[in-house]
C-alpha cells in the first residue's frame, strides 16, 4: 500500500513539474517569437544594406522569400535524409535549419568579396586613365568622369558615386572616405591618400600616380608569385574534396549494396552527415592555412 502511494506521489510530482514547464514555455513563446522575428528582420535589413552598397537592387520580397525558403527546404532535406525516428528527425531538422539560415548571408558575403577583388584588379587601370587625363590638362573631376566612362563596373559605379556626391555639395575628402569604407584595400587607400595630399600641398599628382602604378603592379606580381607557391595547399584541398566522392563512386560500382546498412540505419545516416561536415571543415581549414596575405 505504501509503495502504491509513493508511486502515485512521484507520478503526480512529475506530471505537475511537466505542467509547470509547459505553462511557462507557452507563456514565454510569444515573447521568444517576437525576439526571433526582430532578430531575423535586422538580419534581412543588413543583407539589403550590403546589396545596396554593391549596386544590386533586389526586390525585398525576394530577399525575404530566400531567407524563408532556404531554411524550410534544407530542414526537410536533412530531416528526410537522417530521420528514421523522432530524435534523428529533430537532429536532421536542426542541422538543416541552421544551414538554411546561414546560406543567404554566406552567399551575400561571397558576392561582396568577389566585387572587392574585381575592384582592386581595376585600380591600376583607373590610375593610368587618371594620370593620362591629368597630363592632358583635365581637372581631377574631369579625369574621374573619363574613368567612369571608360572602365566597367564596379570601379565605374564607385567613382560615379563620388561624382554624384560632389555635385550635391559633398567635399571630395568625405567622398573618398566613404569609398574607402565601402571598398577597403591598401591600393585604394594609397590612391585616395595621394589625391588628397596632392590637392592640399599642390604636388605633382601625375608623378605620384606613376609611382603608385609601379608599386601596385609590383605588389600584384608578388601576390601572383605567392599564389603560385601556395598552390600546392589549394590543390591538396581540391584533391581532398573529390577523393571521398571518387572513392564512394568506385565502391558503389563494385558493390551497389555496400552502403545499404548505413543508409537504412539512423546512426549510419548521422555518421554520413558528420563525415560530410568534417570534410567541409577540413577543406576550409586547408584553404585558410594555405592563404598568404601580401
Image: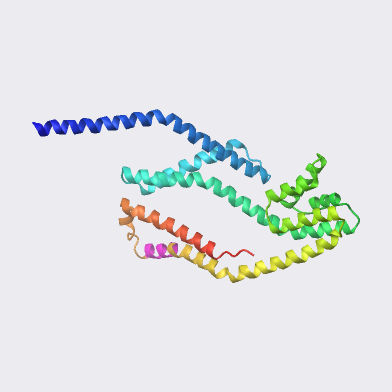
Q: Nearer the viewer, residue 163 or 60?
A: 163
Left or right, residue 59 beside residue 95: right
Coordinates of residue 286 in the picture (x, y in percent): 51, 64
> Which quadrant is the C terminus positioned in?
bottom right
Q: Where 10 sits versus 272, above or below?
A: above
> Would you say residue 70 is visible in this rendering?
yes
Rendered residue at 70%/66% (across/down): 219
Left or right, residue 98 beside residue 164: left
> Which quadrant is the N terminus positioned in?
top left
Q: Where 61 sits versus 283, above or below?
A: above
Rendered residue at 59%/52% (across/down): 110
Q: Which residues are magenta?
A: 245-253
> Where on the picture, by quarter, is residue 230?
bottom right
Was residue 110 drawn as part of the magenta stretch in this picture? Answer: no
Residue closest to the far right: 137
Left or right, residue 213 beside residue 134: left
Was residue 249 drawn as part of the magenta stretch in this picture? Answer: yes
Rendered residue at 83%/49% (across/down): 145
Q: Where 50 sits versus 225, above or below?
A: above
Coordinates of residue 105 in the picture (x, y in percent): 55, 46
Q: Nearer the viewer, residue 166 or 111?
A: 166
For the stretch drawn in magenta, the main secondary structure is helix
Left or right, residue 196 beside residue 88: right
Amino acid at each position: 500500500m505504501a509503495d502504491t502511494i509513493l508511486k502515485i506521489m512521484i507520478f503526480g510530482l512529475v506530471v505537475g513539474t511537466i505542467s509547470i514547464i509547459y505553462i511557462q514555455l507557452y507563456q514565454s513563446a510569444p515573447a521568444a517569437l517576437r525576439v526571433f522575428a526582430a532578430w531575423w528582420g535586422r538580419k534581412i535589413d543588413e543583407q539589403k544594406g550590403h546589396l545596396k552598397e554593391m549596386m544590386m537592387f533586389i526586390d525585398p520580397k525576394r530577399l525575404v522569400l530566400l531567407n524563408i525558403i532556404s531554411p524550410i527546404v534544407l530542414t526537410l532535406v536533412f530531416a528526410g535524409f537522417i530521420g528514421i525516428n523522432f530524435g534523428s528527425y529533430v537532429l536532421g531538422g536542426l542541422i538543416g535549419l541552421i544551414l538554411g539560415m546561414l546560406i543567404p548571408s554566406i552567399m551575400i558575403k561571397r558576392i561582396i568579396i568577389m566585387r572587392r577583388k574585381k575592384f582592386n584588379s581595376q585600380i591600376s587601370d583607373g590610375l593610368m586613365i587618371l594620370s593620362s587625363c591629368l597630363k592632358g590638362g583635365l581637372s581631377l573631376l574631369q579625369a574621374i568622369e573619363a574613368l567612369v566612362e571608360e572602365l566597367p563596373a564596379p570601379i565605374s559605379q564607385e567613382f560615379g558615386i563620388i561624382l554624384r556626391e560632389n555635385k550635391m555639395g559633398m567635399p571630395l575628402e568625405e567622398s573618398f572616405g566613404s569609398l574607402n569604407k565601402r571598398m577597403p584595400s591598401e591600393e585604394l587607400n594609397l590612391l585616395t591618400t595621394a589625391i588628397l595630399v596632392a590637392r592640399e600641398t599642390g604636388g605633382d599628382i601625375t608623378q605620384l600616380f606613376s609611382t603608385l602604378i609601379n608599386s601596385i603592379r609590383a605588389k600584384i606580381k608578388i601576390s601572383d608569385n605567392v599564389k603560385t607557391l601556395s598552390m600546392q595547399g589549394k590543390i591538396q584541398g581540391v584533391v581532398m574534396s573529390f577523393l571521398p566522392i571518387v572513392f564512394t563512386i568506385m565502391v558503389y560500382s563494385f558493390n551497389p549494396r555496400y552502403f545499404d546498412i548505413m543508409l537504412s540505419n539512423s546512426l549510419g545516416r548521422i555518421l554520413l552527415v558528420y563525415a560530410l561536415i568534417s570534410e567541409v571543415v577540413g577543406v576550409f581549414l586547408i584553404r585558410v592555412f594555405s592563404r598568404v596575405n601580401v
